[in-house]
Amino acid sequence: MIKLSPQAEVIAAVISYSLCSGSLVLVNKLILHFLPFPSLVIVVQLLAAIFLIYGGNFFGIMDIDEMKWEFLKPYMIYTVAFSTGVYTNMMCLSTSNVETVIVSRALSPLVVSFLDPIFLGRELPSKRSIAALATIVIGAIGYASSDEKFLYQGISAYFWPFLYLIVITFEMVYGKKIVKSCEFKTLSGPVQYTNILGWPPMLIFASMGGEFDRLEVTLQQYGATSVIDYLFKLPAHVTALVVLGCLVGTGIGYSGWWCRAKVSATSFTLIGVLNKCLTVFMNVLIWDQHASPFGIASLFVCLIGGSFYQQAPMRKDGDESGKAQAEKDLIFTKEEPSDLEMQQNEELMRPLVKRDTTPEKNEE
């Protein structure tokens, strides 16, 4: 493997994470524009990630963890939230523009800050964090007031964004309690479990959403006799987008943790905000499916508020183990206002787990 100097490694980590984080939501939006099968697209991305991980291990490029039953049990529970979060994220992209998805993601600290004292024994938000949360709310209200879809359809226009917010909030708060007992030796461990356990629930979502029926109709329209035949008949640019989505979806799971390990928490938060700005800028350039100028300005107000939010410390009456866990949790909550990221979105490959002291490498 290529040995980089410390400075070059920082630059490489920041660039790789920025490319993955800034493009993942937009790439998935473009894929769904041509292939309206959100759950099936995610299945392809998850299986591709598994193939890339174990392929990299086979050729000696990366180390992986052994699959253990004691880790499978908590991850089976966590995977329900993970899969639901990914599905609702893709449904948001299918029914809303990119900016709406980013705003709904930016609202997550507002809910997390009041659930943390209940589930994780933290104090209430500080004055600075309350001001940051108020700024996020002001930005979100401003965005909704300029959103044509919301003005015409009312609150029903935000059904999927609201559901996405609820699911990722649960994943952030309670998900950490479920999987905090899992200690992995490599950064591939969390990605292995979430991808191996994540694709079967996505097939269930695909069936519930009628995606198999729509796929059958699409096969008939293309004159394809099978899914494989259909894939070969897809336009080259659509195939390229699917491949890019698989690579970016896998890459964010690693580049996120690599970048975290090389920069400060403040720098990482700033990078996350700049990545969102990059996503919005690219979305505006590519097509007309984006928010109004006032809506985009309101989105940036949300991002600015999120950048000033700080996670509350543990309560003084908390036990020592809780305090130790809080220190570890700080690592997971500095990606974005609360980015996750992933992504999947950028929270697509971003499981919240307890890590050991091996070099970090995630990251949605």
Image (cartoon, helix red, strand yellow):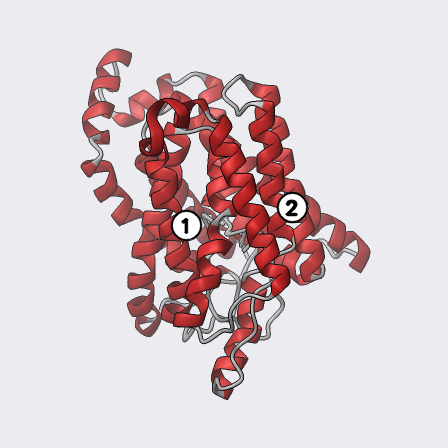
Q: Is residue 139 left or right of residue 261?
A: left
Please state the horizontal and vertical placement of residue 252, each as a whole percent of the image. Answer: 54, 47
Instruction: Say which residue appears at 54% left-offset and 80% top-offset.
Output: 324
The amino acid sitting under disc 2 is Ile
Q: Is residue 79 visible?
A: yes
The amino acid sitting under disc 1 is Ile
Q: Which element carries disc 1, helix, strand or loop?
A: helix
Q: Is residue 59 left or right of residue 273?
A: left
Quadrant in the picture for residue 180: bottom left
Quadrant in the picture for residue 331: bottom right
Residue 50: mark: 1
- Above/below status of 292 relative to 23: above
- Above/below status of 187 relative to 281: below
The reply to whether the C-beta atoms of the residues labelled 1 and 2 are less than 8 Å apart is: no
Q: Which sits earlier in the primary sequence, circle 1 or circle 2? A: 1
Quadrant in the picture for residue 266: bottom right
Q: Which element carries disc 2, helix, strand or loop?
A: helix
Instruction: Say which residue appears at 51% left-offset and 69% top-offset.
Output: 124
Q: Which residue is mark 2?
A: 304
Q: Nearer the viewer, residue 2 or 309?
A: 309
Instruction: Say which residue appears at 49% left-offset and 73% top-offset.
Output: 122
Density class for disc 1 (Cα within 10 Å; few <14, some 14-19, many ≥20) is: some
Instruction: Say which residue appears at 37% left-offset and 43% top-offset.
Output: 162
Please state the horizontal and vertical placement of residue 123, each as a whole percent of the image. Answer: 51, 73
Please state the horizontal and vertical placement of residue 142, each as a whole percent of the image. Answer: 53, 34
Please state the horizontal and vertical placement of residue 52, each as a whole percent of the image. Answer: 47, 47
Q: Please state, as top left, top right, bottom left or bottom right, where the N terminus lies in the image.
A: bottom right
- Above/below status of 84 relative to 180: above
Q: Is label 1 or label 2 in front?
A: 2
Label 1 to label 2: alpha-carbon separation? 36 Å
